[in-house]
Amino acid sequence: MNSKYTWTNDKPTSPGWYWYRHPRWEDLVPVVVDIVIIPQTRELTILWAATNQAVKDYLGSGQWAGPIEPPEA
């Protein structure tokens, strides 16, 4: 199965749904996160399940792939 998404160390620069994997999560599958622009701060923000974090402040060493396109209707 071929994928049009490529893993990169570059942080996302636009809103959307992204695959994310962390090198310490070898036994876990990658997760999908929602990246949005928060109106109050106008910052690109990762919506994690437990917290939100500005993309520019994220110091994680993981990889990203996306944005993921929604499925066709």
Image: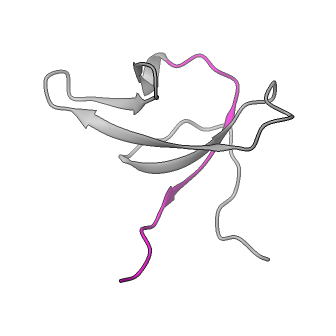
Which percent across, then down, holds residue 63?
68, 38
Residue 62 highlighted magenta (yes or no): yes
In this view, 57 is above or below 63: above
Assign the magenta stretch its main secondary structure.
Answer: loop
Count of numbered badges drawn on the protein: 0
Which percent across, then down, holds residue 7?
71, 50
In this view, 62 is above or below 60: below
Which percent across, then down, holds residue 30?
69, 43
Quadrant of residue 37 within the rendered picture: top left
If the image is split into quadrants, where does the C terminus sit? bottom left
The residue located at (46%, 28%) in the rendering is 49
- In the rendered view, does 23 fall on the left or right side of 10? right
Which percent across, then down, holds residue 29?
75, 44
In this view, 1 is above or below 25: below
- Asked whether 62 or 70 is in front, the reply is 70
If the image is split into quadrants, where does the N terminus sit? bottom right
**In the orientation shown, which residue stands out farthest toward the bottom?**
73
Residue 2 highlighted magenta (yes or no): no
Quadrant of residue 54 within the rendered picture: top left
The residue located at (70%, 24%) in the rendering is 61
- In the rendered view, does 47 fall on the left or right side of 37? right
In this view, 24 is above or below 18: above
The residue located at (19%, 21%) in the rendering is 41
Q: How is the image coloured?
A: one colour
The residue located at (15%, 31%) in the rendering is 39
Instruction: Report the magenta residues as a range.
Output: 58-73
